[in-house]
Amino acid sequence: MYEQLLAKRNKERMESLQKLIQTENSWFAQNINLLVFAEVNVVALQKILYQVVRGLLKEQQQRYLQIVYAEQSIQENVLTLLAEYDDVLRDVIPHPIYILIWQVSSLEKLASSNEVVDDVLDILDWYCQHRDAQVKVLSEEELDYETMIDLYKEAVEEQDPDAQYQLGQYYNATEGEHFQPEKSLKWFERAAIQGNVDAQYMLGNFYFEGIGVKEDEKLALSFYEKAALQGHADAANNLADMYFNGEGVPKNYILAKKWFEYAAQHQVAEAMFTLGIIYEQGLGVTVDQEAAFNAYKKSAEAGYVVAQYRLGGIYLEGRLGQVKDVNRGLVWYEKAAEQYHVDAFYDLGYIWSNGLTGIRNVEKGIHWFKQAALQGDAEAKLQLGHIYNKGEGIARNIKEALKWYRLAADAGVEEAARLLQELKGL
């Protein structure tokens, strides 16, 4: 799986780096073969890191040699330099690389090499290509390397699956400079191999969506199934989705229903909603309007916005055995609108502007249509044009009507384009 891909990628990266540094006649050109993947050890990695740190300090004209003693180990040398020249190094090394140097320097043993060699190659690649680039200066509050060092040591030296999973999560933060999906993937895989259920679920997501790796629905299915069999409710829901949609496996509504029911029992609101679809459409079961309604209602009450919008429509239209109740529909549309459901914005605009509750409030209608229009709803723009053009419940405003018709026409609404020409001819 990914571990084999990582080993292959590491080899290719090392060959590329060898070509890059040959022309510099540096220490690295002579010693990069220390990264022998079957035999790599901590000392070899730390010798490379030592040269990186010395090189950075030399470029900053620092007299680093005075604090390095012959009797110290290579690891102690690197750590001494990092600690003594922390302020200098922090100003010239990007945050992710800074943390990697600390992490690898702190290792005392290796339980597995591919993941650590990958990190050292990241450091070398940056050093050889980007060491002169301007970097963001980091404050003490932004540097969480002590926590990251502890996690890294536990993940590498102890092969602790929880630490490996937490490292995967750290690199999976989609906001900021830490987001590195390939690093997430490698740590999630290490944890998943040891049975970490959350890592298995995350790997299912990565392979399903192609995050840091080529999309592979069969592998996604496999990881979701492993996690679901260990009781992971969200994995069960995603596994059910794959059976439901025939993704990576033939459609199977029976198995889909089984896993949706498990997820729903464990409070996964999306699973409750899909059970509603199954019962409403009779997918692998006899149509059951009452069961469909109850499933939608439970999902809506659990906060699932799609279900809230669906329930609003059910009450508004009087479907699935329910008495038509516009006011109840309005309540659920408003709940969906609170979660920025664009169709709920539009329907609220329609309900209020047309007085479907028995009370017409054009201003409220305009408010909700504008919310939908701001989210790109072309039909809402058309309705705003109609309201200002007709002047029912408010003063007629041709200027505003032209504006909204023009916006709707630009969005491809033919009726708006026709009405725009008619108004221009007045």
Image (cartoon, rainbow, N blue to C red):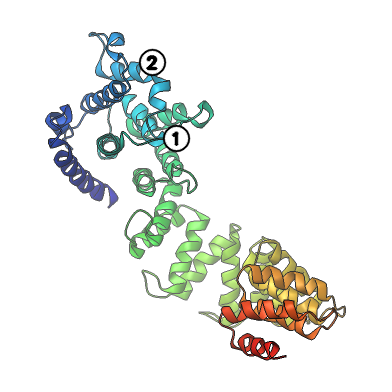
Residue 89 versus residue 47: which sits nearer the camera?
A: 89
Residue 283 higher or lower than 265, as above or below: below
Tell me the residue at 81%/81% (across/down).
Answer: 396
Between the C-alphas of marks 2 and 1, the distance is 20 Å
- In front: 300, or 12? 12
Residue 267, image x, y percentages: 61, 58
Determine crowd level at label 1: few under 14, some 14-19, many 20+ residues with C-alpha closer than 10 A.
Answer: few
How many neighbours does mark 2 have within 10 angstroms: few (below 14), some (14-19), or many (20 or more)? few
Instruction: Specify which label sits upstream in the sequence, 2 or 1.
Output: 2
Residue 284 percent across, percent down from the top left: 50, 79
Whether 11 is drawn above or below 389: the answer is above
Depth check, front residue: 413 or 203: 413
Residue, disc 2: 84
Residue 309 appears in the rendering: no
Residue underneath mark 1? 136
Report whether 210 appears left or right of 113. Answer: right
